[in-house]
Image (spheres, helix red, strand yellow):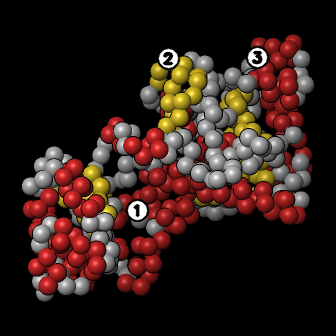
């Protein structure tokens, strides 16, 4: 078996990050994912671009097959419907209604293949006043309150990576697996409606729980910088050459930290005896810890604290994180070949299952790379027909 989803075919109509990532996850698990792009391409200009190829696209779209098809033409829609007949899943992150207008929405394709699984991962989901609004990761972060609890007291700051795109793609893949299992049990397909807004609220679950019971303006409803709302010390500290993050989550762990710093007297200081005490006097406590960390390099702090089993990490840039030995140990950078980029390393699969692990075999290939394989091999078109489709701008 090449993957647990071997034999499952996905038609992917996606762009950017959210939808394509869902497709990549399914492809890592062995599904045949056919990415359908317009002849002029889709999100293939995201930097960095090397030798005319978006490396960003190559990473996000690993393991897929790539065909071009102009869905703004009758012939293109006709061919797409032929592909639907021999597929199991349609995956899209287009705005709700876009595919319906083309005649290939869920109700349309269900008539072609009754047990089709139609997975939509959009900004706001279907059938509501927000459905047609444009949505990007940081727009959703603003709407669900993520900006409201991220950053400095007087300055909201976005997360570095587009975390809600990643989470939404992951949830879309998870829902697809659930729909496949339901189909296995019942023989029925279904419509899957994933909204980034819903995922964003889900990601805020701890803050929402706090706000629901402590109210507006509580510790769960404000920006705390690098501090935690319910435990201390749990923050970022300066070192001689950078920063470290130190996290304690119990009185016992705080005691270990004090011992590591040769400041065991702090345990009996009335300001810091309980977690609630430490939260009330967090600025004083952080100042003491910061004075200790500032006298050492980040590596020295990490080495000392790990000997006492304290959660600590040096704050690294992405370029430094790739040098972490765990990257190689966990096989999170894999060597693949690309028709234009040659031998490159891309991010591996985090799906570490003992029997059916996620596998990354190929980077995202050039536009239309698999046209002949799919149109000739899967739909039994002749080379002459395929050439005519090219000439007429259909593929």
Q: Secondary structure at mark 2?
A: loop
Coordinates of residue 7 in the picture (x, y in percent): 81, 43
Coordinates of residue 19 in the picture (x, y in percent): 61, 46
Q: Earlier in the sequence, mark 3 or mark 1?
A: 1
**Residue at the spot 14% in from the left edge and 58% down from the top edge:** 293
Q: Is residue 305 visible?
A: yes
**Residue at the spot 26% in from the left edge and 62% down from the top edge:** 307
Q: Secondary structure at mark 3?
A: helix
Left or right: residue 304 versus residue 37 is: left
- Residue 194 higher or lower than 13, as above or below: below
**Residue at the spot 46% in from the left edge and 52% down from the top edge:** 163
Q: Which residue is mark 3?
A: 390
**Foreground pick, 86 / 291:** 291
Marks 2/1: CA–CA distance: 37 Å
Q: Secondary structure at mark 1?
A: loop
Q: Which residue is mark 2?
A: 51
Marks 3/1: CA–CA distance: 46 Å
Please give the label number shown on residue 146: 1
């Amino acid at each position: 078996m090449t993957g647990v989803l071997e034999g499952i075919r996905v038609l992917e109509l996606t762009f950017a990050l959210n939808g394509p990532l869902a497709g990549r996850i399914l492809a890592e698990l062995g599904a045949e994912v056919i990415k359908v792009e317009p002849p002029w391409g889709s999100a293939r200009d995201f930097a960095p671009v090397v030798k005319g190829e978006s490396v960003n696209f190559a990473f996000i779209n690993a393991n897929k097959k790539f065909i071009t098809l102009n869905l703004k033409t009758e012939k293109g829609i006709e061919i797409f419907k032929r592909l639907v007949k021999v597929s199991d899943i349609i995956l899209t992150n287009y705005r709700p209604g876009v595919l319906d207008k083309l005649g290939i929405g869920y109700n349309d394709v269900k008539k072609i293949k009754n047990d089709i699984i139609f997975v939509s991962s959009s900004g706001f989901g279907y059938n509501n006043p927000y459905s047609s609004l444009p949505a990007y990761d940081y727009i959703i972060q603003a709407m669900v309150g993520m900006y409201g609890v991220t950053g400095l007291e007087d300055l909201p700051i976005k997360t570095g990576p587009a975390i809600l795109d990643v989470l939404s793609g992951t949830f879309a893949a998870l829902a697809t697996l659930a729909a496949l299992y339901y189909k296995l049990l019942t023989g029925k397909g279904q419509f899957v409606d994933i909204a980034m807004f819903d995922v964003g609220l889900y990601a805020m679950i701890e803050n929402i729980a706090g706000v629901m019971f402590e109210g507006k303006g509580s510790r769960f409803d404000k920006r705390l910088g690098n501090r935690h709302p319910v435990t201390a010390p749990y923050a970022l500290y300066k070192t001689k050459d950078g920063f470290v993050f130190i996290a304690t989550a119990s009185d016992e762990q705080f005691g270990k930290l004090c011992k590591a710093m040769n400041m065991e007297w702090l345990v009996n200081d009335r300001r810091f005896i309980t977690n609630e005490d430490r939260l009330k006097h967090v600025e004083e406590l952080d100042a003491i810890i910061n004075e200790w960390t500032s006298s050492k390099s980040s590596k020295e702090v990490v080495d000392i604290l790990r000997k006492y089993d304290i959660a600590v990490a040096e704050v690294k840039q992405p370029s430094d994180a790739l040098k972490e030995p765990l990257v190689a140990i966990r096989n999170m950078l894999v060597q693949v070949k690309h028709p234009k980029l040659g031998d490159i390393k891309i991010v591996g699969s985090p799906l570490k299952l003992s029997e059916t692990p996620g596998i990354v075999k190929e980077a995202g290939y050039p536009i239309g790379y698999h046209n002949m394989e799919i149109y000739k091999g899967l739909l039994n078109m002749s080379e002459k027909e395929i050439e005519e489709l090219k000439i007429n701008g259909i593929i």
